[in-house]
Amino acid sequence: MHVLLINQFYPPDPAPTGQLLSHLARALAERGHGVRVICSAQRYGGVSAQGAADFDSASAKPSRIGDVVVTRVAGFGFGRRSKLGRVLDYASFYVVALFHALVTPRPEVVVMLTTPPYIGFIGTVLRFLRGCKFVQWVMDLYPDAMVAHRMLSWNGWLTRLLGLLTRAMLRSADAIWALGPYARRKIAPYLRSRQLDRVLIVPPWGSPSLGPWQGNRNDLRAELGCDGRFVAMYSGNMGLGHDFETFLKGAQQLPDVLFLFVGGGPRAPEVRRSAIRHRLVNLTFRDYVPKERLSESLSTGDVHILSQLPAWQGCIVPSKLAGIFAVGRPAVFVGGEDNEIAHWIREADAGFVVPIGDSTAFVRAVESLQGDCSLRDRLSRNARSFYLRSLSPDVNLPKLVGSIEKLGNGR
């Protein structure tokens, strides 16, 4: 069976959506399926593949990664410097990706992600023009995410128009993959009631190679200046749907805790400026680490901190928690109650859930883990156990592969 996967990002780009897609591509190839990926030649943030240090100089050309054929298509490269530039980048990717999708050998199944927004319509077109089965993997739900970001209002005409487009796109899909139960709840109003059984819930997992650090010494702790310190770590994308003010206020009250932010994202400059403004000498920033050192990096944190603004509940599901639990670390989550992260932390009994803006509760949670080794060890064991039974690729990838194979076999 031939399967086509389309998303704006794909490794070696560090974007989480591309990482998850690469795991699916390898799993399908290992099952003997022909797999082709269409993605952008630009990396997350708009830098061209050729200009990025961690990209192969020839990565913008069609290539084969293992048994997976990857076509990196060219387009505008304005990046995230302006809204207009981002829209033009999206438009160019839509056009070029659609062209390549129409001229590639016909796939039995096409899997579309949601970067850029509404790229799923390529799946709709292929379904009707080429008779493919169409799977929509909903990483971000639009226009809900745009409303959460206050780009649109719920009552605006553009929101209503985009809602109609989302409804048309999702209703044309033969299968829909949601990242969790609250994400499924958000998707449901766009579907007919009889289509709800098309929605498969599969949480975002961690890297297949992730696990507790096994070395005698974590050299990265020394490299990052963490030796002898209790480390509260934020790892990954500092995105639009996350809260950071609670962390920063908490850091002011925890001078003996080192707050380590590893990663990047659209809000990273804002967080850096705020740390400087508040003169937080116990807060430090580092860029993404190489994938082969991710277990070592995540194990650097004694506790991990993560967040989600309540308006974004169900619109996005941060993938950070799977990595945190994979290395066996407890988490302190700052956010609302009706979301996957709060649900999984409580179900696992592997951390604390703190309301947005409650820096006092955040400080208490971090202090309890700092001062009680037995509590920290118990929550760490719980985190690893929950990962193995609920959030690992060994559990979740077979669900997606099975969904594709079922569609490809006409069932």
Image (spheres, grey):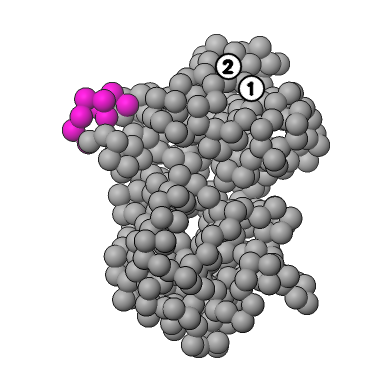
Q: How far across and how far down the image is residue 139, in percent?
A: 48, 41
Find disc 2 in the rendering and name its residue: 96
Main SS of the magenta part reads helix
Q: Are marks 2 and 1 in contact (CB under 8 Å)?
A: yes
- Furthest residue toward left: 155
Q: How far across and how far down the image is residue 393, in percent?
A: 65, 53
Is residue 218 within the magenta segment? no
Q: How far across and how far down the image is residue 374, in percent?
A: 55, 88
The three-letter amino acid code for the residue at tag 2 is: Val
Give the number of the disc on residue 73. 1
Q: Secondary structure at mark 1?
A: strand
Viewport quadrant of the C terminus: top right
Vertical side of 358 occupied by 313: above or below: above
Segment colored magenta: 154-162
Of residue 109 and residue 276, the one placed in the foreground of this image is 276
Viewport quadrant of the N terminus: top right
The three-letter amino acid code for the residue at tag 1 is: Val
Specify whether residue 399 is in view.
yes
Mark 2 and mark 1 lie on one chain; the one further toward the N terminus is 1
In-image side of 274 versus 109 (left or right)? left
- Res 164 → quadrant: top left
Q: Residue at x 73, y 23 (%)?
A: 61
Q: Secondary structure at mark 2?
A: helix
Give me the C-alpha separation between circle 2 and circle 1: 7 Å
Of residue 200 and residue 257, the one placed in the foreground of this image is 257
